[in-house]
Image: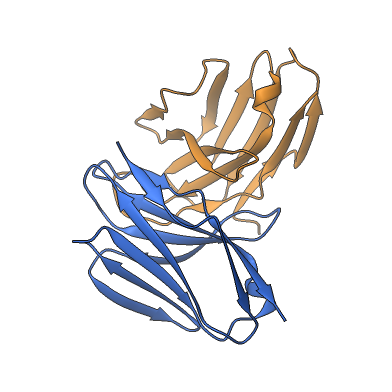
Amino acid sequence: GQNIDQPTEMTATEGAIVQINCTYQTSGFNGLFWYQQHAGEAPTFLSYNVLDGLEEKGRFSSFLSRSKGYSYLLLKELQMKDSASYLCAALDSNYQLIWGAGTKLIIKP
Amino acid sequence: DTAVSQTPKYLVTQMGNDKSIKCEQNLGHDTMYWYKQDSKKFLKIMFSYNNKELIINETVPNRFSPKSPDKAHLNLHINSLELGDSAVYFCASSQESGEVNEQFFGPGTRLTVL
């Protein structure tokens, strides 16, 4: 079956760095998305990776290893506004998005 | 200039009623989606639809039906509402199905069935 695993919740300190991991098993693979969802709001797109390696976009970076079925989202210089859920989603061979349950990130001062 | 909009934002209704949620996108996208997000925050695809194809998640009860009057709209109609239908329903759109395109989400409709 198809499956996405990510931690349920993580806590980090303002100004620090946090890494949110995601492992996936899908029927075929056409890339991996990360979305951010603040409480009570809609998910918003953060990143897309299809090739192995690290993609950097400001304070956020996303990494992919296709051979390991693994990705992570790296958040640097954490701010209180980064408190949100981070959703990992893999695109399968039919271009259907398979979603993880999300990782709730709590930032403490 | 909202990209994907949904109405209503909140919907409270009794078991057994029939209700509709409307979705509109002004992005010129070809594909629209409906998701259900339950209390555990898991996003579950219900439907994806473009002019050519409706893809239904087989786990979705047939009480749920998407209706698309035109390319910019995909409404969700729910018959005989049940307590388990309480959730947040998100509409989303993307440029084209069958390709890699990010999805843009509407603000969500929080449905509460009493």
Quadrant where the N terminus of chain B is found in the figure:
bottom right
* Residue B60 is at least partly visible in this image: yes
- Determine whether B100 is above or below A17 in the image: above
Q: Position of A88 compared to B72: left or right?
A: left
Towards the viewer: A2 or B36: A2
Residue A10 location, x and y as percent?
57, 65
- Determine whether B16 is above or below A8 in the image: above
- Determine whether A93 is above or below A38 in the image: above
Towards the viewer: B57 or A82: A82
At x 52%, y 33%, the residue is B70
Q: Position of B33 compared to B78: left or right?
A: left
Q: Position of B52 compared to A106: left or right?
A: left
Chain displayed in orange? B
Residue A77 location, x and y as percent?
57, 86
Q: Position of B26 compared to A6: left or right?
A: right
Q: Name the tint of chain A in the rendering.
A: blue
Residue B114 location, x and y as percent?
80, 23
Location of residue A26 (image quadrant):
top left
